[in-house]
Image (cartoon, rainbow, N blue to C red):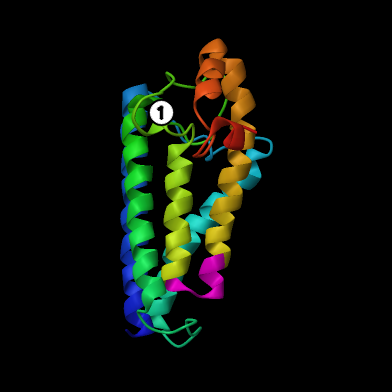
Amino acid sequence: MMAATVSMITLALTWAYLLTFLALTMRASRVAGRGVDYFSRPVGSQRWTALLFKFGFIGSGAWGLVGILYPNLWPQLPNGLGWHAWLGLGIMLVGAFIAVGAQLQMAGSWRIGAVEGTLGALVTGGFFALSRNPVFVGQMTLFFGLAMFQLDPVQVILSACVWIAAIWQVRIEEPVLVRSLGQAYQAYATRTPRWLGSIKGSKR
């Protein structure tokens, strides 16, 4: 498969997820009756996580477009639709399913960023019974698959930005959740892993 075709698939899947993400965010804002995107005015360390998320998300969409317009700008390693691309595509679809599904389950509790006094109700069912951060798990899975599918150094860096941002953001959000939701969140955290797997392996 030509590099331009790989870039077209990358572009389509990336923007399909981004537009779905934005649509669900707008829906959550209507349900909450106020804005829910606190990355639009980030404070403290969230300025950096917001920047990394935006760089990774928007950069991936833009890089796919660059690959279509200039297919020989940066050759893939290896070039073509090999096993890595098929595996990466499958991982991307699984990640998108988890991320979108978890965001849907949050409904009006969905927020981008964490600010005390603005959190919605605690969601503990569905994907949230398996992980305290299933949206991030889905996004990290999606962008890992994207890096494997595209398989060039630029996309690897963009995907790494999303991973770093997600891990960092969880560390920022957890104290806010404890202060805002109190014992309910603490009880939830004792029985549900931060990411996936056992409590012992993922809580800290």
Q: Nearer the viewer, residue 138 or 201?
A: 201
Extreme residue in the bottom direction: 72
Magenta stretch, main secondary structure class: helix
Q: Nearer the viewer, residue 1 or 11?
A: 1
What is the span of residues highlighted in magenta in the rendered image? Answer: 150-156
How many C-alpha atoms fall within 10 Å of the one at disc 1: few (<14), some, or many (≥20)? some
Q: Secondary structure at mark 1?
A: helix
Reading the image, the residue beneath label 1 is 129
Q: Quadrant of residue 121?
A: top left
Residue positioned 31% across, 35% down in the render: 104
* Residue 174 at x, y percent in the picture: 60, 28
Q: Is residue 22 above or below residue 85?
A: above
Residue positioned 42% across, 33% down in the render: 130
Instruction: Identify the amino acid type marked 1.
Output: Ala
Look at the image and tell me whether residue 145 can be seen: yes
Q: Quadrant of the C terminus?
A: top right
Query: How many numbered circles are shown?
Result: 1
* Residue 50 at x, y percent in the picture: 57, 45
Look at the image and tell me whether residue 42 can be seen: no
Residue positioned 31% across, 79% down in the render: 5
Q: Is residue 90 magenta?
A: no
Q: Is residue 151 magenta?
A: yes
Q: Nearer the viewer, residue 123 or 58?
A: 123
Q: Quadrant of the N terminus?
A: bottom left
Extreme residue in the top direction: 183
* Residue 72 at x, y percent in the picture: 45, 88
* Residue 38 at x, y percent in the picture: 52, 34
Residue positioned 31% across, 56% down in the render: 16
